[in-house]
Image (tube, rainbow, N blue to C red):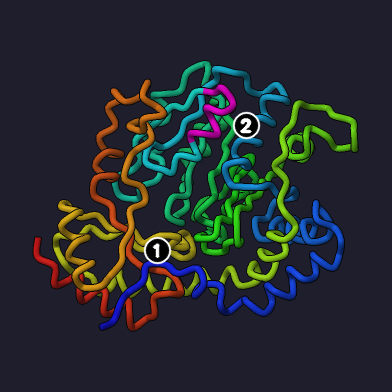
Amino acid sequence: MKHYTFLNLATINQQYNSAIKDAVNRVIDSGTYIGGDEVNAFEKNLSTICNTPHCIGVSTGLDALRLILRGYIELGIMKQGDEIIVPANTFIASALAITDNQLKPIFVDPNIVSYNINGDYLEEIITPNTKAIMPVHLYGRVAWNEKIVHIAKKHHLKVIEDNAQALGATSLHDGLYNSRATGSLGDAAAISFYPTKNIGAMGDAGAIVTHDKDLAHVVAALRNYGSNQQYHNSFKGLNCRLDPVQAAIINVKLPFLKEENKYRQSIADIYDSEISNAAIIKPLKRIENEVVWHQYVIRVANRNQFRNYMLENRVETAIHYPIPLHKQQCYCEYNNLNLPISEKICDEIVSLPITRCTSMQDAHEIATIINNYQP
């Protein structure tokens, strides 16, 4: 009987296997195992994709966010206790980067339709301590609009994109620097190449892209023990460098970013047009390239019942993410916050298969299975 796999990384990487092995061997033969040509090439390639003048390869997407905030602290733009606005329905890395720097997360409800940060709520929660907005391009949909631009400029706020899930997506509105590519919309952006991403490494990897030359200089030092010159340490830094093996692997796959995103868009288009069950709330349809579908997330009232039904029909699903940030045990001081939209979303969301593991025919069949679901 047919089984509909949610994700199998061996299958995803099969098409790249030969080129990846050649790239890894190239690193081995080079004798350069920290930094080097592969990391330099990766940074140049990613800068081009994101349309930013600066790119700094780092160890993870979380470290990218951490280093951006730490960089602003070192530059005197932020200080401990300052506030960063962040949506409550995202992955915990967004908040961990804030609190790791002794900054304060201000959790906000997202838009119930887009699942992204709601510009309508921002003005009322800004205080003299607010220093940045962190839009998260959740599930691959661009979290950007003219309200964010207006509020950031009006209140002199930094805009830090969490672009872990939307590399290659394009905003419908201009960013702060007249660019529309995710990663170039705000002042700086963090990117993740965790293996499950649309373009993933074979291990942890991340990057910072920015328009800010001073920030780029500081974070490049911070990732390397606080040093831009060997044994001269300007900052109390960290070891968050990008591994050249992972850089080489990503360099193999980056030229296929548009192709990979287009494939996911094709699967999503099938779901959009064919899922008609009234019990299912589908995500907003794509407009041009403003969503690259890292996940295709529906909502259903009785999630456990629905997921059990899908398993009975051999369809794997997932949840991204079941617990909002303000309800996590590690943020118990925020557990009493009233953020009903985040809680509702996190109670109802289900991610459907949308990777190369899912064929176009599979997508048609999964839509039919969903349409036959009876709550």
On the image, the x and y values in percent for residue 229 come to: 90, 37
**Circle 1 — which element?**
loop
Q: Residue at x 50, y 40 (%)?
A: 93
User: Can residue 177 be seen in the rendering of this structure?
Assistant: yes
Q: Nearer the viewer, residue 319 or 122?
A: 319
**Left or right position of 200 against 230:** left
Q: Residue at x 80, y 52 (%)?
A: 34
Q: Is residue 99 magenta?
A: yes
The quadrant of the image that shows the C terminus is bottom left
On the image, the x and y values in percent for residue 162 come to: 53, 44
Q: Residue at x 42, y 67 (%)?
A: 7
Query: What's the residue type where badge 1 is placed?
Result: Arg
**Left or right position of 375 against 238:** left
Residue on which disc 1 sits: 286
Crowding at dot 1, Cα within 10 Å, few <14 / some 14-19 / many 20+, comes out as some
Q: Residue at x 46, y 47 (%)?
A: 143
The quadrant of the image that shows the N terminus is bottom left
**Looking at the rendering, which quadrant does residue 322 occupy?**
top left
Q: Is residue 162 magenta?
A: no
Q: Gap in Å between the C-alphas at discs 1 and 2?
A: 32 Å
Residue on which disc 2 sits: 69
**Left or right position of 141 against 129:** left
On the image, the x and y values in percent for residue 215 come to: 73, 35
Q: Nearer the viewer, residue 78 or 354?
A: 354
- Specify the segment rendered in magenta: 95-103
Q: Please tell me whether residue 234 is drawn above or below residue 173 in the rendered image.
A: above
Which labelled disc corresponds to residue 22? none
Q: Nearer the viewer, residue 327 or 32?
A: 32
